Image (spheres, rainbow, N blue to C red):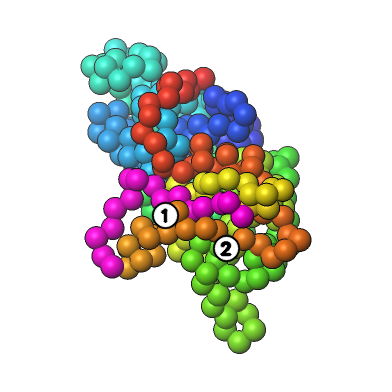
Amino acid sequence: MDWLERVAKLRQWSRGGVRAPHKPLLLLYALGRYQVDAEGELAYTAVEADLKGLLAEYGPVRGTTPAYPFHHLVSDGVWEVRTDRGAGSPGSGVRELRASGAAGRLVPELRAVLRQDPSLLGRMARVLLDLHFPPSLHQDLCDAVGLELELAETATLTAPGRRQRDRRMRDAVLTAYEYQCAFCGYDGMLGTVPVGLEAAHVRWWAFDGPDDVDNGLCLCSLHHKLFDRGVLGIGGTEGAGGSGRGHRVLVSPHFAGRSHAAREHVTTLAGRPLIGPRPGARPVAAPHRSWHTSQVFKGSTRPDRLVSGV
């Protein structure tokens, strides 16, 4: 059994690039807990708040509950659920999981393989991270779920059959934006080498975002992280001839910062025109901007319909 392939092919609700990261988040959480207690079970009532927080922080603004992945991950062959009545999940309802004393853990076959090959855990985690989240969030996610991984020492592991990243994108994007952050104008250099500047994917690579200039922004490290976390976004109009001159910085209404630094570096960006690419370079394409607005930017608390866990 190829556990990496199984993890890479988790069955998820999917339509038009919509993010549904509830199963990957639960599995990452379970791997983190496995490192602490390889045979321990995760009682739903004990982990419900943790999973709800992960979904709120790392999922799109869309109504869902941790009960969905807790029940539906069973169908992927990596997770099992038991209740006071024995093996099997009582369903995907919060009440049923709470009332039945439901508890879950990795299936026995996977636990046995992990005992024989502890390095598999890290490879599985990297596949989940690579397929569902941008690199800027990988360490944050590991910290959030308690995973001890040496991410900095190992290149991102691409899942079987997945395309490879184009390493030339960074240079192309930084050159197009003349080595300055599109949000704040930061243009730091150490000698002739840019420092603290990164090429951000607008539509995440993990969700078929191309390694093209019109899917990229040159951002400083801070604003790249905030862009990928949904604190910042891109609004406004396309401008004449699709020039992108009408693009403006969006700031999530959920962001709060009391310090002068938080106001200066984040809050006051709201409505500011993007520093666009140099003439002749393509600005962010409308479809990529729309994807980020709907799938990443924390701009609305409007309850969309629940996502099923399939």
The amino acid at mark 2 is Ile
Q: Secondary structure at mark 2?
A: loop
Choose top left, top right, bottom left or bottom right for residue 54: top left
User: Which residue corresponds to the image point at 42% horizontal and 54% vertical from the top-left?
Assistant: 270
Where does residue 163 sit, x and y in percent of width and height? 73, 45
Q: Look at the picture and state if 299 lies above or below 82.
A: below
Q: Considering the whole magenta stretch, tell me its main secondary structure.
A: loop
Name the residue carrying label 1. 270
Crowdedness near tag 2: few (<14), some (14–19) or many (≥20) residues, C-alpha within 10 Å:
many
Give the alpha-carbon distance from disc 1 to disc 2, as whole Å.
Answer: 13 Å
Magenta residues, as a range?
245-260
Residue 223 shows up from this direction: yes
What is the crowding at mark 1: few (fewer than 14 residues within 10 Å), some, or many (at least 20)?
Answer: some
Frontmost residue, 115 versus 35: 35
Rendered residue at 55%/54% (across/down):
135
| Residue indicated by mark 2 | 275
Residue drawn 61% across and 36% down? 8
Residue 293 placement (x, y as % from top left): 51, 41
Q: Tell me what residue is drawn at x 34 percent, y 45 percent.
A: 253
Under circle 1, the secondary element is: loop
**In-front residue for pair 58/145:** 58
Foreground of the two, 79 or 167: 167
Q: Is residue 240 magenta?
A: no
Q: For this view, does 148 lie left or right of residue 237?
A: left
Residue type beneath disc 1: Ala
